[in-house]
Image (cartoon, rainbow, N blue to C red):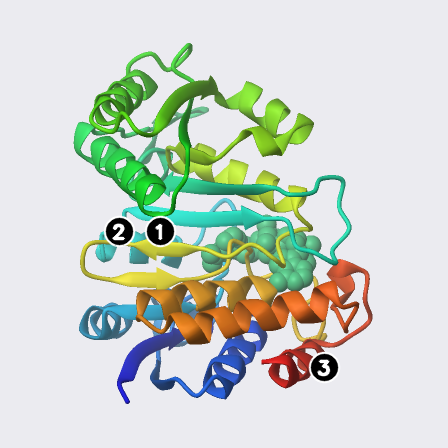
Amino acid sequence: MTCHAVVLIPGDGIGPEVVEAVVRVVNATGVAIDWRRAEAGAAAAARNGTALPESTIDAVRAAGVAFKGPTATPIGGGFASANVALRRALDLYANLRPVRSQEGVPTRYQDVDLVVVRENTEDLYSGIEHIVVPGVVESLKIITERASTRIAEFAFAYAEREGRQRVTAVHKANIMKMSDGLFLDCCRRVARAHPAIAYDEIIVDACCMRLVENPRRFDVLLLENLYGDIVSDLCAGLVGGLGLVPGANLGDTCAVFEAVHGSAPDIAGKGAANPTACLRSASLMLRHLREPEAALRIDRAIDRVLAGGGPRTPDLGGDATTTRYVDALIAAL
Ligand code: NAI
């Protein structure tokens, strides 16, 4: 049996609680994992003076795969985001977020099945800001042909591989004619090389309205970093909230799996965190590690418990603690 090396980054807030749930459930599938614990985030910054120690980056480089809990980033000052730094240090250029309706979780929409593909390395997340004169701040949006082409190629290759029908590029090129214009030029060029996949474009504000109106009309959404960040949370709201939606940060040599949600400081330490988003991310990780059967067992256990009216956490209208929900999942594996 292969033993897979996976770097485990618990993170901040509810991070340690949901990451522990992942370790319990993945271990219960019987897949052998060498979990290598590493630090990142606010607690790491307080301990080491940096939110992303070099040793953590080295550990992920060596293992090639990491599972990460959410890490907190101070607002309006303080240290820079460990997430952004990790994605850039390891060139994890593609952020993949499948958004699906969950049976047994009542929402306004049924049968939502779309995928957010978010560029993960540039845009306004380059963090290049300066004071021009007191009272005037400039923040630079960097869009390159290389990163835009690479993420478009990723989206089309993913669509072909997963039997998806259409890629929709989301932009604001009516206003940002040069930066979003370049992004669209790259998307169009890549689309021409993939004639089997339909391609269209939509302005980001209209996209948000159409998503709320009828999310079923979308298939694969292809977005720059900032629009991808915002639209991901919107999409999570369509299917039952941030407790459900998984994610993967993928590069050519490394992959880091994590939920879309943040550290949820409002519920941290209360045993109320929903680990489903992390468990679905763990399922993506197991597929990446070529353990598809274990991935399927986790997905089916979640479906069985939630669709069958089993215990659920307060965000889904239940009263179960994280631990009680995870016990039910393990029983259902
Ligand atoms: P958040 O996603 O942490 O929380 C938003 C709301 O959703 C809160 O009411 C929270 O209780 C709820 N929620 C989130 N995940 C949940 C779960 N698993 N179960 C039940 N309820 C859940 O977003 P917020 O409050 O804007 O950010 C908090 C911190 O997280 C910030 O420091 C932010 O920088 C960081 N963050 C980190 C991310 C990462 O590490 N990938 C992603 C997003 C935010």
Amino acid at the residue labelled 1: Val
Residue linked to disc 3: 324
Camera-side residue of 190 and 86? 190
Disc 3 element: helix
Relative placement, left or right, of 315 versus 282 is right
The structure residue drawn at horizontal position 57% and vertical position 43%, both measured from the top left corner, is 233
How many marks can you see?
Answer: 3
Query: Distance between the Cα atoms at labels 2 and 1?
Result: 6 Å
Q: Residue 132 bears which disc, if any?
A: none
Residue 158 in view in this figure? yes
CB at mark 1 closer than 8 A to ligand 1?
A: no
Q: Position of residue 40 (x, y in %)?
A: 39, 69
Q: Is residue 309 above or below residue 20?
A: above
Q: Quadrant of the rendered structure where residue 66 is? A: bottom left
Q: Position of residue 30 (x, y in %)?
A: 43, 88
Q: What quarter of the picture does the N terminus occupy?
A: bottom left
The structure residue drawn at horizontal position 51% and vertical position 87%, both measured from the top left corner, is 28
Residue linked to disc 1: 84
